[in-house]
Image: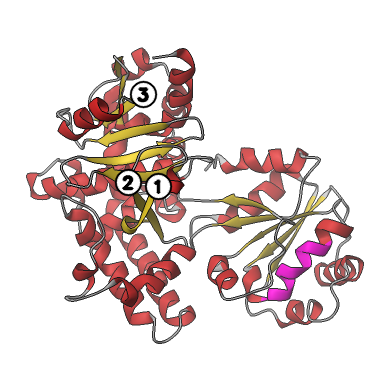
Amino acid sequence: MYRFAIERLYQWKKSSYRKPLVIEGARQVGKTWLMKEFGRLAYQDTIYVNFDANPTMAGLFQMDLNPERLLLGLELYAGKKILPEHTLLIFDEIQEVPRALSSLKYFCEEAPQYHIICAGSLLGIALHEGTSFPVGKVDFLSLYPLSFEEFLGALGLERFAEALKQHDFSLITALKQTLIEALKQYYFIGGMPEAVAHFSEHRDFQEVRHIQQRILAAYEQDFSKHAPLELVPKIRMVWNSIPSQLAKENKKFLYGLVREGGRAKDYETAIMWLSDCGLVHKVSRITQPHLPLKAYEDLKAFKLFIVDVGLLGCMTGLRQRTLLEGSSLFTEFKGALTEQYVLQQLAAAPGLNICYFTNDRGSCEIDFLLDNGEAVFPLEVKAETNLRAKSLKTYREKFQPDLSVRTSMADYKEEDGLLNLPLYAIEQLPGLCSQEMHAGL
């Protein structure tokens, strides 16, 4: 399967300002595969080092961090010569050997001609625990589950993904049924690479659920294995509460839903741990929709989404038939799945800050506010084709944004500063916003 992140890796390779690259992302989103695939495609040779339970490598980095000495040790370990610019060095699970992280500073300063990519499923946690990190000496790339357009490619529908990228909405509307069916499948399967790969080959929904259950079980094991003992029950409670939090009409995270009488101070650290793992997206409330959004965050109010829409459906026990046949049994939760899907696609877009808005009276709620550095765009999310959006109307009348966006199962349309964008095209929103703003919609 093709990952769009490969294109960013090629840009990194060509950059004259290249530094060692750190790939961040939750466990099982495909970091190891991406690094190895890039090595196969872009280099003459690849040396892969996994630091997990690797005493040889721990010993090598225990002493001084002189790059020349480390490179000699890596050559002896791999049994092959490391050639600058022709060999890709991959350090996986690098958080297991903190001094290997520290060594990136010296590679950057003293041996920048060597190409090094690193990853670690729990890297974010290691950094917050005080690991010495080479600030300013590394580049970063965040990896997420497959997006909907990557999913289309994995299912052999690359031409549909290409039409979306070209913004050919007259063609897309004519062929929309294929995209709608694929979107329903994506809601169930999600973007975890193992689930997508299995489905693309076997078209077996039941086995997809088994794969998702195994992934969720692995996350639960991570809680026990890597989190402080006293924090584990709180992490589990927060994690397991997320589906019910999102099922509410008002999706603001409520500590009382985690446990009766729960308060922020009881669970803040647990939420931070899940966020550092890449398992949750925290979307903050904004009090005023002005640039930059971060300056107007209400630190006490936020929504929590998980890493993948397919895993969210698995956590709730949502059945294939219920989702694909549009059963009324999950009408209320459909909004939660749709919002999760939209957030998941937008979170992968570089340079996009995502928040949400409610006024002080709570009479106006905008699902997402997007800040692309140029302007703030309100985004209203609708699960079906019902386009009534009282809050969006209220928001537009008060703040008069240059561009507003509504996404639903309805067809593409733009009028009077309002862009109606089909859900299956939401990945194109960042580019469309810039395009429409410069065109003066």
Q: Residue at x 31, y 24 (%)?
A: 400
Name the quarter where the C terminus is drawn: top left
The residue mark sitting in front, 3 or 2, is: 2
The residue mark sitting in front, 3 or 1, is: 1
> In the image, what residue type sits under mark 1?
Tyr
Q: Which residue is mark 3?
A: 403
Q: Residue at x 85, y 70 (%)?
A: 70
**Image height check: is 250 above or below 258?**
above
Of the pair 59 and 65, the residue shown nearer to us: 65
- Of labels 3 and 1, earlier in sequence is 1
Q: Which residue is mark 1?
A: 296
> In the image, what residue type sits under mark 2?
Thr
**Image height check: is 359 above or below 377?**
below
Range of residues picked out in magenta = 97-106
- Of labels 2 and 1, earlier in sequence is 2
Q: CA distance from mark 3 to mark 1?
A: 20 Å
Of the pair 96 and 90, the residue shown nearer to us: 96
- Of labels 3 and 2, earlier in sequence is 2
What is the crowding at mark 3: few (fewer than 14 residues within 10 Å), some, or many (at least 20)?
many
SS at circle 3: loop
Of the pair 290 and 55, the residue shown nearer to us: 290
